[in-house]
Image (cartoon, grey):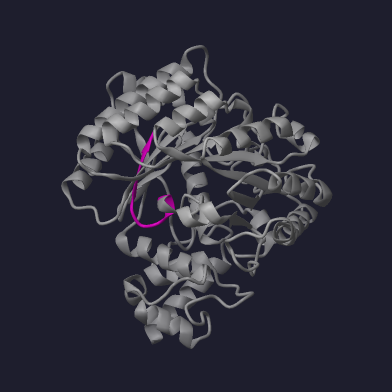
């Protein structure tokens, strides 16, 4: 017990002296590795007996415009033919990985970006066809921009087992969209794209962001109400975070008033949703909605939702393309180094792209998963909990958790729990402060902790 108490105190001390839970105490850093080394790890993976599923993630980084709030890897095409070269490189990489991983079934296919729907229907058909040729058919989901989504493209997706489409709408306020470099998105285009997907029998998710520059409580609520009138199966409402975005890289940090306004939008959201269209999940209002909530209606709830949880849960994610984060379970997370044009040039020259890797291990990944369950109040008494029985009993004994969940208003969160359960406490580093997190006043939930890891990966990929 004394050993566990000392470990917990070290975690609390580490969290108190840092603004970045990924850097200290979790020590999650991306470091260079060669493409050859990375390829050899997938070969070893294929020769073993993977216990969990394999997810295929295809990253299309290109966008017609770069939105000022974008957190991850997006860029504009570098001249005529850039997209065609990139798709050709993706097709070649899929074939190479298909040979290495022959016989391993996919749990799911995700296509993200960037703007996957920037591809023409023929290019989208070629890419999805290459994935099916390499790995066989699997259920899929695609991220889409309402302004570049056509019925023809949706029909191509549907023909290749894509059953879910997620529209990154973010706001329906014209002034906010203009500031965000997204003035081409109108409500009419959003409604047309959503209805077309719905009519084809696809499940539809819409993303909204609270707290974008220029958004008010009133305008955000109007966007929310307009969205709820559409035939959607899921709604993800999240907080705008400047870190990692073009706004953040140019020096923008939300002020205390901005943070309070966004928190108010998120707290009001639940009442609006439950009044206008009560969700099947979550059945009750969340204890803390300051980072956002995902709402599911019957079809989405039955199908398991839209949060890409299978990319976060234990298991491996084969990421193909420039800018997408993947992982080999119990080994490392990774991202290809450099931009899309360089990545495509390297692949088309028959070479293996250099990577940036962040090393993990089985205990860390199990701890992250258990922390996720605790934060959601869904731990249970299964094998995953038994693997951490002494640590969980200690946390129960000091009142940090009760009945496998965090008490309302707890100052302990996912990073604390993951560090304590895994025994992973990194050394302090001199990292720049990210004041917006401290202003929100809440610890990062597991899904956002994972998102911040992806943001760190994207930053490492851009670094010279």
Does the magenta portion include 447?
no
Direction from residue 337 to residue 288 in the image, left or right: right
Question: Number of numbered discs present?
Answer: 0
Name the spot of residue 285 as percent of width and height, x first. Answer: 65, 67
Q: Is residue 58 visible?
A: yes
Query: As rendered, which of 45 and 360 lies closer to the eye?
Result: 45
Query: As rendered, which of 212 and 8 lies closer to the eye?
Result: 212
Residue drawn at 47 percent across, 13 percent down: 81
Residue drawn at 75 percent across, 60 percent down: 268
- Vertical placement of 387 versus 83: above or below? below
Direction from residue 297 to residue 123 in the image, left or right: left
Name the spot of residue 340 as percent of width and height, x first. Answer: 45, 26
- Vertical placement of 215 versus 286: above or below? above
Q: Which residues are magenta?
A: 311-320
Direction from residue 120 to residue 327 in the image, left or right: left
Q: Is residue 353 visible?
A: no
Residue drawn at 31 percent across, 28 percent down: 93
Residue farthest along the top direction in this orientation? 80
Q: Quadrant of residue 132?
A: top left
Name the spot of residue 409 as percent of width and height, x first. Answer: 64, 74
Direction from residue 93 to residue 397 in the image, left or right: right
Q: Quadrant of residue 433?
A: bottom right
């Amino acid at each position: 017990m004394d050993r566990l108490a000392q470990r917990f105190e070290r975690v609390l001390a580490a969290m108190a002296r840092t603004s970045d839970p990924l850097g200290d105490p979790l020590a999650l850093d991306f470091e260079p590795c060669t493409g050859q080394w990375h390829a050899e790890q997938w070969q070893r993976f294929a020769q073993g007996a993977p216990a969990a599923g394999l997810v295929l993630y295809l990253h299309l980084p290109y966008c017609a415009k770069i939105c000022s709030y974008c957190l991850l890897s997006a860029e504009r095409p570098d001249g005529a033919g850039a997209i065609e070269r990139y798709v050709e490189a993706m097709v070649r990489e899929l074939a190479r990985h298909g040979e290495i991983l022959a016989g391993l079934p996919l749990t799911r296919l995700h296509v993200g970006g960037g703007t996957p729907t920037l591809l023409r229907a023929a290019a989208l058909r070629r890419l999805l066809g290459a994935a099916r040729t390499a790995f066989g058919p699997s259920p899929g989901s695609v991220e889409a921009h309402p302004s570049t989504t056509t019925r023809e493209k949706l029909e191509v997706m549907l023909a290749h087992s894509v059953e879910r489409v997620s529209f990154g709408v973010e706001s329906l306020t014209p002034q906010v969209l203009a500031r965000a470099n997204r003035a081409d998105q109108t409500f009419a285009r959003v409604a047309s794209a959503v209805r077309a997907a719905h009519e084809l029998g696809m499940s539809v998710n819409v993303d909204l962001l609270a707290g974008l520059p220029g958004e008010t409580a009133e305008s955000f609520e109007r966007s929310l109400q307009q969205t709820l009138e559409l035939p959607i199966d899921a709604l993800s409402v999240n907080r705008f975070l400047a870190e990692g975005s073009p706004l953040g890289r140019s020096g923008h940090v939300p002020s205390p008033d901005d943070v309070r306004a966004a928190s108010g939008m998120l707290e009001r959201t639940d009442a609006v949703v439950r009044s206008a269209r009560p969700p099947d999940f979550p059945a009750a209002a969340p204890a803390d909605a300051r980072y956002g909530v995902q709402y599911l209606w019957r079809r989405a709830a039955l199908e398991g939702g839209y949060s890409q949880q299978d990319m976060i849960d234990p298991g491996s994610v084969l990421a193909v393309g420039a800018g997408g984060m993947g992982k080999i379970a119990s080994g490392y997370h990774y991202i290809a180094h450099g931009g899309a044009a360089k990545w495509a040039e390297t692949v088309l020259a028959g070479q293996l792209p250099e990577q940036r890797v962040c090393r993990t291990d089985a205990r860390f990944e199990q701890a992250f998963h258990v922390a996720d369950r605790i934060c959601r109040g869904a731990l249970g008494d299964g094998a995953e909990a038994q693997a951490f029985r002494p640590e969980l009993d200690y946390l129960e004994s000091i009142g940090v958790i009760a009945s496998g969940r965090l008490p309302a208003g707890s100052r302990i969160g996912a990073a604390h729990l993951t560090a304590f359960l895994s025994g992973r406490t990194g050394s302090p580093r001199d990292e720049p402060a990210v004041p917006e997190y401290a202003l929100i006043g809440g610890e990062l939930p597991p899904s956002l902790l994972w998102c911040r890891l992806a943001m760190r990966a994207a930053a490492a990929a851009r670094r010279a």
